[in-house]
Amino acid sequence: MKTGSAWISFSIQRVALSLFGIAVFALKISAVETLVSGPAVELPALVVTEKQGPIPWRYGQISGLQILSACSDYKTSLFIDRVYRQQQLLDLLLPTTLQLRTAAPTTIIVITEEMQRAISAEVAEAMVGANMSGADKNSRTARLLPSLMLWADDSPVVFVALPEDDLASHEVEFNEHAIRSLLLRRTPALPAWFIEGFARFHGTAHPKSANNRMNADDWAEPNIDQLVIDRGAWLSDGETEAVRNDAEFPRALLPLRELFQPTLTRSDPAETQAYFERWASQAALFLRWGLDPAGGRRDAFLRFVEQASARAEPIDDAWTLQCFGQDLTDLRDTLSDFLHEAVNEPRTMPAKITGSANLKLHAATRSEIALTKGDWERCEIAYVKSKYPTLADKYIAQAGRTLRRAYEQDARDPRFLGVYGLFEAQYGDAAKAREVLTAAVDAQIVRPDVYYTLARLRYDEAKAHPAALGGKFSPRQVAGVVAPLLTASKQAPALAPVFDLLTEAWLRAAERPSQTDLAVLEEGLRAFPRSKRLLFGAALLNGISGDRARALLFIERALRESPTPEERNRLEKLRAVLAPSAAAARTN
Amino acid sequence: MTLYKSMPSSRFLFRCAFLLAWVSASLAAEPAPGREFVPLFAPLRTPDVVLAPDGRHVAYALHAGGSTALLVVNVDHPTEKTMVAKCNDARTEPGDAEDSPVPLRFLDWATANRLVYSFAPATGLPQQFFAVDADGKNTMKIIEQGDLDYFASEADESAPAGGSSGSSSTARTPRPLRVLGFLPDHPDELVIEAIGELIPRTTNVPTALFAIGVESGRLRPLGEGMVDAVLQYDQQGSPRIAIGAPTADSRETISLSENPHGWDQWIDLNRYLGAGENRFTLSASNVFDRRAFPVGFDYDPNILYFASNIDRDTYGIYAFDLKKKQRTALAIEDVTVDLADAAAAPESSPLIFDRERHTLVGVQIAAPDRRVKWIDSDLREAQSTLEEKFPHRLVRIGGWSTARDRFLFSVATPFDPGRTFVYDRPHDLAIEFFRRAETHASVIARTLAFTVDLPSGEKMEVWLALPAQNKINPPPLVVYCPDQLTPWEPLAPQPDLEALAKLGAMVARVEYRAASGVGQKNLASFRAAFDRASADDLVAAMAWIAAHYPYNSRRVAIVGQGFGGFVALRALQLHPDAFRCGIMIDALTDLNAWLSTDAKVAEQNALNFGAQAVTQQAAEIAGETARAEDRPRGSPSAPGPLRHGGPDFIAAGLGGGRVIATEQNALHTGPTERLSYPQRFADNARRAFFGVTPKELAERSPFAHPELVAKPILFLQNRDDPATAVARAQAFSAMLKKLGRESMYVEVDGQFARRLPYASARAFAKIDEFFNLHLYNFRVDLGETKEAP
């Protein structure tokens, strides 16, 4: 295994990303996913009172990852090693430039199946205590997910129950949901066809060792030198078989324009489903073609994807001609011709997947437990609120207990303060939130959501008590809001609300923003090139700053993003105000 | 035996192995010339395809592995595929050294479950028609050409108005057949016209119409008559228009049958309609001028559709109500293109009807891309939907189901016949069924079609193919001048262009002025200066290409075929600095020779088409009224019928010219190409069009100015062309050599004219050789040797 700082910083990124897959890891690992059959209320695990006595939590960090585990060090390490290797596999298929970057570490909480069963009982209890309808009580049975990934705004938190038997007998794989989740949050946003296509394509790739497919046992001593990409699929098993056997079996591929800009809804749900399946199958076919190790077009394809995510314009003939030497219709034909090969011929490519993650665990401190558990419980609240609002209070109370108790017990780790501050800002005391978030920011923690939340609190306060004339913010108020936002804008992942709030703050400022200020918005637009809100804000600010021609460009871009009638109206009004001046400026 | 005995077995085996290795090594060392070009000239894989009226089945011909299979596939369950017939490739012309696919002469669904087909018969064998169910069962030969032969007794011959019933004691005369389609009221009956002949002092054979049951094979005579004309039938199967065969100098007469059921009551159409003497009249002088001609009947037998460009630039489609003897309000017009092909065979029609709804739905445009102008709004919408799905492509609807929930259509580019699809309208899905030809992506990287604005204000189409592999960068340019006076099927493969691209050159096919189908103004500007104008068009196209797709301007070759050869030679003479070399394929070198019909032509036709043609030609040359058949020409430069375009897509006749989607294979000819105008008439029409004196024609002929040709030329000449054409090309090459110019003369045969794979490959091996010498050569001019100081 390589060592050294350069590698470590690279590794941070890779390991952080690995965790997206863990949400489905448990489903692959054993049959514990369903404790009971039938309809179930899917609730996130509550790591609660530890009624059976204190849990001997172990804590460890490797690059980009913090782990809180209730399992043995051996089992935890074994699991993390597998995740680490899966991440390497992912990196082989997809350059890191197209993956999500998170500056904050990803949190993973590992428990045993036994603990999971106990928690299950607690959750059932919680449900009984909650004000659920009779129908819900009778028709649904509580079921815990064996693993779940929830998202803080800037990083994922993962909860997983490991099986009691030997982990070496289980294969770890990221599944489609995990891959989608990973790709969905990348900025600039990846195109939908790429996300869906890659999620499916990724599932067909497997490591291969010594001329054979990897067996689960091989994971203990990996000697992986090849990646095998299984034969592809098309629509259904029956269709796949038919195309496999007959190169000329009729096939309906969507025009590429439709692949890139699908209209997924149909009046009939069955039609919608069928259309989606066709679209997704074709997306996977396109990915397979683009990344085909034998095709020699991988670099061009990846450049195309990168451009497609960065550019606001729809993909057209000129674009694909430039990238692939084919217009959209030719490309459709090419895919059609490739289909028979795709469903018939597996591919192999050289691969080097190595070593373990070298995770070192130690007894978790109070801060470490509160930091990880507290963040998990905080994230659970939003999840439960969206699905079962009547249960949300219990989750809020639980998170509050975990975080406040630790704070009262003098936990002052800045990372913990960040999590605690986020909780208080969302569900508790704003003043307390401001206090602890300020402390976290002063300690320069790496977590963009912390900076954004502090800025939001300051903005709300400034809005309530504007210090300049005409309800405007004073320079001091603006600086108080903008400073943490500028820090947040430099941390990954890019958060759209950061740039929205910057826009709002400058719009309320007594003084015009400088060109340097506006350059930050350009950065935001690179990350969110199709954000109508940001485009509108950028148009307004450029208009105010006197660059009306530039403002008009942003308006045109916003108008291309299918605005609602109300949005269109606003945009056109602004254009009407700006247009004459812009025309005059061009003349001059 | 002695040798074997004296040699140990192991040594013998070794020697055998050595010999085998030597033989194979020798073969490998000397491959057949141009073998790499062979795949480019492979025939279409799926030349014919038809959709069943209920949209549930597609029948198609698939050429693979040396045979053509006729298959039926279930659209809903495509794994259900049945082969209903198979026909092995064969030598289609005497003297051929290689097999060709046997084309389907007819393929269409009579009903949702019954398919009728007929392969082209081998030489000397009768044409046969079969019917088969969609599941491949109940195959039945429903008719054979001999069943429709004319039987005449001794008495009949002296009184030629007799019927067709014959007996064992009568003489038997075969009649060519023309399929008209299915009767609207009896869709299970196929209607076939058996074409008679009236040749003075020889024989009189009536033309007759028959209905054949597709389930039973029962033959039902529908009528017959002694008609010396091409007949147009109404939708009920009655002969209504008789287009008399024009002689060389006389006018064509167009007659109307007032009696919908009669074969013998004809009246001059102009006189009947009071339409003015010249409206429905064809003469050699107005073929390319202003006139009107009938194009078909509506399902209402009183409505006659006709095409006219009188008082306008392009041909529009109009209608007469024959009962009221006045024009209806119908006017289908397009200001940019002709909606009818004035030079097409008289029995063809641009009209497209819906045979289920009994309505006119569209008109086939005569311009080169053969689009359809849909009148039916539903079909127009379908066309628009499909064009949205396949932008920048030629999308052609070739059939539709009765409920219009399924459409058969093809998507092509100018260089690629593309693919055939079924559009499932309720699900908005275009289901791809076949690729019509093998793709040659390794040869052509990309094709483009664009319009160049000419200085004269006109527009010109140019198709450009970018090579997949260059030999040098930027690549050379080959300007390809097609034979604009012969039809071009843009959906057919363009193997010549692909082969040229394979040589590493950009290939531009330039639709220089001369193309019919785009109105009188365009033709007039061509006519005014047909040599210089066309040559200037080429230069304009080159300038446009240079501005958009850089090529090596010092390495430009020009290739011309037939009349395109004339244009290419004139371009070499008029713009000598623009080109590095030229290739002339069956090039027209001498306009006077081209516009003359003499005994040599008749002799050539006799060689090509047999004694009967000699008789006809002789009679025609003698000035007698006789119909002379023009067969498709062996080579574009051979004197041929006066046509541009052709009924390759629309079958006229019963069923109202329904789209039958038997898209023409460039390698075979459709049934409706059999009839055309006589040779002398065609020549006179050309002479009338070009309208200059023999002296002026000579002035404009490349043949008269060999001294103006400064660049190397390769002549590829079909030895089966008329002797005059061969002699002119040969003489021209000799004259160039005498002048010290580089010229190669290579004779090819009719197999190359028909672009059979191996013959074509041999020809392109020569072209390859010529290009290596004259297009790619990097000549280094060394100065005098100087000593270094």
Image (cartoon, helix red, strand yellow):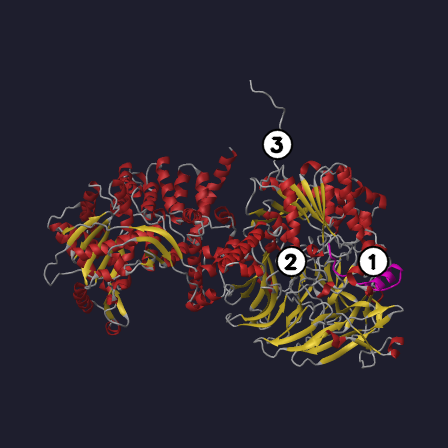
> What residue would you read off at disc 3?
B780
Mark 3 to mark 1 CA distance (whole Å)? 51 Å
Q: Which residue is mark 1?
A: B603
Q: Residues within 10 Å of mark 1 (few under 14, many from 20)?
A: some
Q: Position of residue B637 (x, y in %)?
A: 75, 52
Q: Residue furthest top?
A: B789
Residues in magenta, as a range: B613-635
Name above or below for residue A445 compared with residue B757: above
Q: Chain of mark 3?
A: B
Spatial CA distance of label 2 from label 1 is 39 Å
Helix, strand or loop for disc 2 = loop
Q: Residue at x 62, y 48 (%)?
A: B500
What amino acid type is highlighted by mark number 1?
Glu
Image x and y of residue B469, in percent: 55, 46
A517 with respect to A367 (left or right): right
Would you name the residue on which mark 2 appears?
B371
Q: Considering the numbered disc 3 on the image, is that residue within a helix, a strand or a loop?
A: loop
Q: Earlier in the sequence, mark 3 or mark 1?
A: 1
How far is the residue under mark 3 from the one under mark 2? 50 Å
Q: Amino acid at mark 2?
A: Arg
Given the image, what chain letter belongs to the residue carrying mark 1?
B
